[in-house]
Amino acid sequence: MKLEIRELSKRYGSTQALDSLSLEIAAARVLVLIGPSGGGKSTFLRVLGGLETADSGRVSINSRPLAADPAGLQAFRRRNGFLFQQFNLFPHLNALRNIALPLEKVHGHTPEEARGLAEHSLARFGLLEHAHKLPAQLSGGQQQRVGIARAVARKPEILFLDEPTSALDPEMTAEVLELIQELAEAGQDIILSTHEMGFAKAVADQVAFVAAGKIEEHAPPADLFGNATSPVCRRFLSKVMRY
Amino acid sequence: MSRKLWTANLAAAVLVVAGLAWLFTSVFSMLENQTDWSKAWEYRETLWQGWKVTLGISFAALAGSIVFGLLFMLGQRSHLVVVRWVCRAFLEFVRDTPLLVHLLFGYFVIFAPFVSRPLSDLGMNDKLVIGILLLSLFEGAYLGEILRGGVESIPKTQWESARAVGFSPFQVYRYVIFPQALRRVLPAMAGLFVSLIKDSSLLNVIGVTEYFYNTRNFISRSYAGLEGYIPLALGYLVLTLPVAWLAHWLEQRFRHET
């Protein structure tokens, strides 16, 4: 995917979440956003994912400008997938219905087709045995994997993941990260924010360091983790890599 | 159950039964010579007609209050600040003044002068139609608040997830928010619907010939007492208990699902 972001700004009340953020990436399969909490990673991701509109600035993804009107954004969200930290699934529907319902109501599949696609998607990630369980009956890791299965069931152009493992314990984190890596290796375009530096290093083509509403620095992982140029980024990395 | 608890329960039961037995015997022995159930039997046709009207009012106002409740809920969540304020003010007014006042004022001052004639020309009972409308508005105001509470109790992440999978605003409500919100407000809604059935008796003040109105007529014409009040109470119980049971059953059914 190709990204061109110019002077993106967004305020929430008195907080400047994005402060004329610019980023240009000519080609990347997996872009990972790292940085301190409250630095703007989530807001940036939500604007890119079409869940939020910026106050000013321009975004173009794969040479297409991002829509600003509600209808255009809805169409954009339908082409892509988005996963949050937690509580992605609808608690009143079982795993299968969670995936099948949007296929049916949003993408116009017949109920049988939707069911088939949903089963296929669950089977792909080894979740078929949980198809008829409600989210509350699944572990946090399984819930996130069903969430991802839902997001990729319609082959999204880009998959947006906002700290997908932050609410999980280390074992569940591993199972979710493995799945994301699998998707990346299968050629899925992904933009994700994470605090898992080892994972970022392993899976990213490009890593962007976001702090105080700006991109401080972006580079391939080997360069950024080995030899960061901005002092803020170096300080952050030295802190998080210490233990 | 331990032996001690068992004895305590038994003692409590005996006390309650004895107390009720004493109350009933003293009441009935006082009225012994005055109760005459043949009077009620004579008026059975009128009472039955009244009960059917109450049933009709209840169903119609139930449907009406759902429509108004949804409108008030959506109005309070509108993007337009004027709409929000108007809804808020109206709900506050309706909830803080008695239904009796709405019925008298709404019927005699607002609606009757304008729509009584046209409704009668259409062959409709204007009192009944206006009464149902006013009752629907009143209960709808409460329902609007109940629904708003339910909808706003759904976590923000659910709204976002629903938008993220591409649902339209209508679909977000239809498939994600309402099914979850309704479950949470079911007990409150059931209580409201039971109140609605009982509140329908107030329609007698504008002359709707419903169950209470007909019973009161029967009592004043025949000097009846308990023969009127007992069927009255039973008649309302027959309507309200199924609602309460249904709500309880639905609540049990959905309990494990969250």
Image (tube, coloured by chain):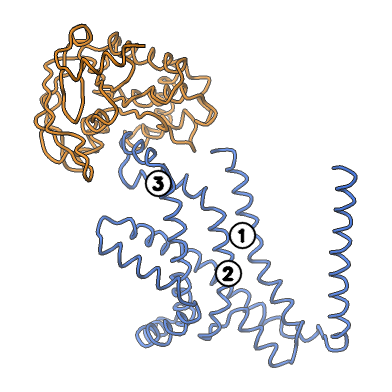
Chain colours: A orange, B blue
Give the quarter of the image for residue A112: top left
Which tag, 3 or 1, sits closer to the chain's start?
3
Is B43 positioned to the left or the right of B93 in the image?
right
**Label 3: which residue?**
B174
Disc 1: CA contacts within 10 A as few (<14), some (14-19) or many (>=20): some
Contact? badges 3 and 1 (CB < 8 Å) = no
In the figure, B55 relative to B102: above or below? above
**Label 2: which residue?**
B197
Q: Residue at x 45, y 16 (%)?
A: A170
Instruction: Estimate the x, y position of residue A199 in percent, counting from the top left.
Output: 32, 12
Question: Which chain is indicated by disc 2?
Answer: B
For mark 2, give the secondary structure: helix
For mark 3, give the secondary structure: helix
Along the line of sight, the residue nearer the viewer: A20 or B118: A20
Give the quarter of the image for residue B252: top right
Question: Which chain is indicated by disc 3?
Answer: B
Instruction: Estimate the x, y position of residue B222 in percent, counting from the top left.
Output: 73, 92
